[in-house]
Image (spheres, rainbow, N blue to C red):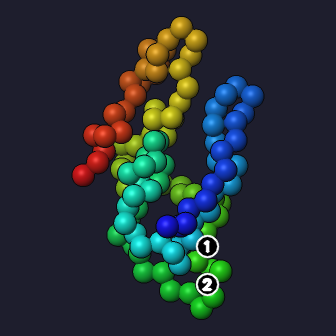
Amino acid sequence: MGCISLQKAETVDGRWYPEFFRINFSRCIFCGLCEEACPTTAIQLTPDFELGEYKRQDLVYEKEDLLISGPGKYPEYNFYRMAGMAIDGKDKGEAENEAKPIDVKSLLP
C-alpha cells in the first residue's frame, strides 16, 4: 500500500521510538490495518476521514502533525502501560506503583 513509512531508533536505555513517521493520506484507504498492526495502539483511527486539500503534498503528515494532546479514541489508553520496558528482574506491571499491562487484543472491536 505504501501509506506509512517510518524509521525505528533506540535510546541508550533500549527504548524504541520512531525517528520519523509519515502517513501519506493520498494513498490511504482508511482500511484500519495500520491500527490493528500497531503493537502499542499508538495509531488510532477516528471517523473523521474527509481530507480535502488543493495540493497532494498537503496530504502527507509527519509525526509532529499527528501528535494529539488528548486521550484519543480510547480514554483509558496509556501508551507507557502498553509499550513500557520491564525493569531488570521484574516483568511489566510488577514494579512498585506500576499498573498491570493492557492486553492490546482487548481493545479491538
Residue 97 visible (yes or no): yes
Q: Secondary structure at mark 1?
A: strand
Residue sticking out furthest to the left: 109
Q: Is residue 12 above or below residue 54?
A: above
Q: Residue at x 34, y 34 (%)?
A: 103
Indicate the position of residue 25 as horizontal and vertical percent values. Answer: 52, 73
Reading the image, the residue beneath label 1 is 60
Residue sticking out furthest to the top: 89
Indicate the position of residue 81 as horizontal and vertical percent values. Answer: 46, 32
Q: Amino acid at mark 2?
A: Arg
Instruction: Left or right? Give the position of 82 relative to 85.
Output: left
Corner quadrant of residue 100: top left
- 10 Å crowding of disc 1: few (<14), some (14-19), many (20+): some
Indicate the position of residue 15 as horizontal and vertical percent values. Answer: 64, 32
Q: Nearer the viewer, residue 92 or 32?
A: 32
Mark 2 touches mark 1? (CB < 8 Å): yes
Residue sticking out furthest to the right: 12
Residue sticking out furthest to the bottom: 54
Reading the image, the residue beneath label 2 is 56
Q: Residue at x 56, y 62 (%)?
A: 4
- 10 Å crowding of disc 2: few (<14), some (14-19), many (20+): few
Numbered tag placed on residue 48 in the rendering: none
Q: Amino acid at mark 1?
A: Val
**Image label count:** 2
